Amino acid sequence: MRLLMISLLCGLGIAVSAQKTNLVYGYLKDSISAEPVVLASVTNMNTGTTVMTNYRGLFKLPVTENQVLSFGAIGYKFDTLRYNDRYISRDTLVILLPALRRNLGMVTVRATMSRYQVDSMQRRKDFLQDIVNYTIPTIAEANSGAGIALNISRFSRHERSKRKAFAFYESTEKEAYINYRFNEKLVTAYSGLKGDQLYEFMQAHRPSYQWLRAHLTEEDLKYYINEQLKLFFKRQ
């Protein structure tokens, strides 16, 4: 499965209100080893609903025909799937996610950059070259470790499909930022949760991108996790 094609983005505008919504089950696996990709994000781009994969790589998500699913995980490329006739008849989806290759060419990687920033640079490089056949422009390190800034305002009105592709990409990059900040190691350290409890907590109490951009320190996340744990155990 190739990374997002511009034509796939047209699915975001298809009217689906009269169609049946299915609870879709699937497994997210490494494209080389076939090992489960755990605690990855799976997003219905039409509805904005995001779920996490469990320790078997399993996810379940409500999807209507022709809606678009996006898959993201730490250290992996993004991938997408339009839920059309090819997939509707299947009991379970199996998605093979390719790992990121570190091949930034002439781009300088600073020692102060986080893993997220380096991976963000690679994803953008892959996106620009593989999807829109566009030479990577000069990029700048964004504030507060929130990825690599890219100015798309220069595109003309005749390139609306490219604009749509970039907007879609920025949305998936926000999910990646959440994955990197609200990660398994950090949540385990401050919650003490493991296994299924950790998975349930991370899915039910996943912070928003906007909250994370407004709260930039690990200390902020520590207090966030502590407050969410009270709600988590109260419901149990």
Image (tube, rainbow, N blue to C red):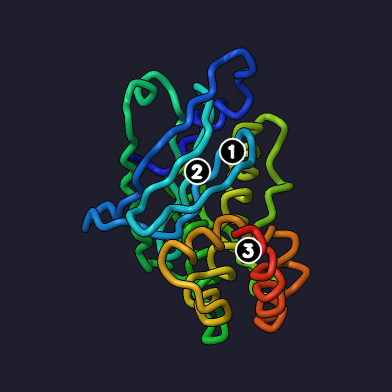
Identify which residue is drawn at 49% across, 73% down: 193
Report if the CB atoms under discs 2 and 3 are less than 8 Å apart.
no
Q: Decide: few, some or many residues near mark 3? Use Cα within 10 Å; few <14, some 14-19, many ≥20.
A: some
- Name the front one of labels 1 and 3: 3
Left/right placement of residue 231 relative to residue 68 reads: right
Q: Position of residue 223 (x, y in %)?
A: 71, 78
Q: Residue furthest right?
A: 214
Report if the CB atoms under discs 1 and 3 are less than 8 Å apart.
no
**Label at residue 45:** 1
Residue located beneath label 3 in the image: 232
Report if the CB atoms under discs 2 and 1 are less than 8 Å apart.
yes
Q: Position of residue 160 (x, y in %)?
A: 66, 32
The part of the image, by quadrant, that contains residue 215 is: bottom right
Q: Is residue 34 above or below residue 184?
A: above
- Earlier along the polypeptide chain: callout 1 or callout 3? 1
Q: Is residue 182 visible?
A: yes
| Mark 1 residue type | Met
Q: Is residue 149 visible?
A: no
